[in-house]
Image (spheres, rainbow, N blue to C red):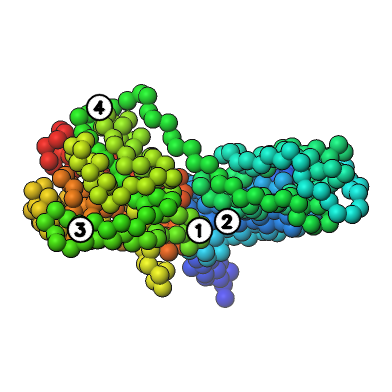
Amino acid sequence: MPVKKFACLLICLLLCLPTAAWAEEPTIRVEIQPHQVRYSFDLPEYSFVYVTYDTANDSGETVLYAEDGHFEGVCQLPGTFEASRMGLNVYTLGQRQLLQTRLDLPDFSDEQAAGLSAEGAASRPENAAIWASPEGVHYSFLVPDRDTIVLRCKSAQEWHKITLYAPDCAYAGTVAMPFTYADDTMTVTVQSASGATLLEESLLMPYIPPAVPVDIPSARLQGLVVCIDPGHQRATQVETVQAGPNFSTMKTTTVGMAKGAVTGRMESQLVLEIGMKLRNVLMELGASVCMTREIQDTFVGMLDRADIPNRVNADFVLRLHCNSRSGSENVQGIEVYCPLSSSYAQQVADINSYRAMGETMLLAMQDATGMHKGACTLNDTYVGNNWSMMPSFLIEMGYMTNSEEDLLLSCPQYQDRLVQGMVQGIISLAQARGLIN
């Protein structure tokens, strides 16, 4: 075969190879430092990924967001002193593995002197104070005749086992818990060096709501009154009430709420977080906002959730919830529910107009989040909707029984997208009803 013809054939064959064959395989880049590993990687086709890591004494998991596909994060290793192996994994939110690496960590034990604890039964810690803040677990106590103890801090998202040395047997410090969600339980255990439990306490990671905006950068929604109703609360009280103003049927509280398939989080906390973010964005646009609740430890009854917006003469009420469907873990989507045959609802709008309003809200949220599964439904199921004297929308923002949506719903950047969609929905509805320009 002539050389020229062979060269042409070779070029054609190379051009037929997939583009991926020329592209560099994505890898995890790491920088190892004492008690932490910084990492980065590039996955341009993804905006959200799920990262896990583990050593013999530390583990954690978190959702990362990157608008441009360049991800960066830090693995916290407060309990890792001796040379050890570490696994670092990157998954889709649906738990399909994308990247992984195994690292050999050096010995950091020079930072910690070896203790020589006394033999025999250990005493319980004295003057013990263990508490939580957004920074993590704080501890202070004295363990007589024990210059070495083991501190274990565990939540659903991370776990650390730390050997502490104190020549005076007095221990104080902080264990960072950056991957533990607000209002999640942390178990703190103090053990002797031999493994005997000396003290154990359960703490809640505090939820610090965003401060009320002081500056109002826009008057876009000035004069508009919006009520936000974060569904549920930590403890449910059973009550039976009239289902609606023109209904003879009664409605009894359904005990329970959605719980995260992966995160284990309570629906009541999740909707409160999103509701408080929504409050601030609406206020920054000049709206007046009424919240039916601002804390977990409160009780708001079914009728109260309608009476509160009715009393303030709200223009709209958004009832925030998260969905669940046992046995159908693949179900996803945003759902909007409007009242159907309530006499109060009929005074607000006819059925077709109400459906159009609900679909406007749904479309705005789908556009903002990219989640295009879901539907708008009119029914008589929800007491708060039935008793509302203004446009009322019960919004199921996603399925916590779906692992992907469960992780997304607790991700701050996805929460921001949900808020953006609801705000745009309010703007469109207010314009349609002639409340704003």
Q: Residue at x 66, y 42 (%)?
A: 130
Mark 1–mark 4 CB contact (< 8 Å): no
48 vs 419, left or right, is right
Disc ID at residue 219: 4
Residue placed under numbered mark 3 in the picture: 243
Helix, strand, or loop for circle 3? loop
- Which element type, helix, strand or loop, lies under badge 1? loop
Determine whether 412 is above or below 356 in the image.
above
Of badges 2 and 4, the one in the foreground is 2
Q: Secondary structure at mark 4?
A: loop
Left or right placement of residue 302 versus residue 346 in this view: right
Classed neighbour count for the residue bearing mark 1: other residues with Cα under 10 Å, few (<14), some (14–19), many (≥20): some
Q: How many marks?
A: 4
Structural distance between the alpha carbons of marks 1 and 4: 39 Å
Q: For the residues marked 1 and 3, what is the alpha-carbon distance in whole angstroms?
A: 31 Å
Tell me the residue at 56%/51% (across/down): 185
Q: Residue at x 55, y 47 (%)?
A: 204
Q: Nearer the viewer, mark 2 or mark 3?
A: 3
Does label 4 or label 3 sit earlier along the sequence?
4
Q: Along the line of sight, which residue is nearer the eye, 20 or 136? A: 136
Q: Which residue is mark 1?
A: 264
Residue 249, image x, y percentages:
18, 63
Residue linked to disc 2: 156
Quarter of the image with the C terminus is top left
Q: CA distance from mark 4 to mark 3?
A: 38 Å
Q: Is residue 155 left or right of residue 396?
A: right
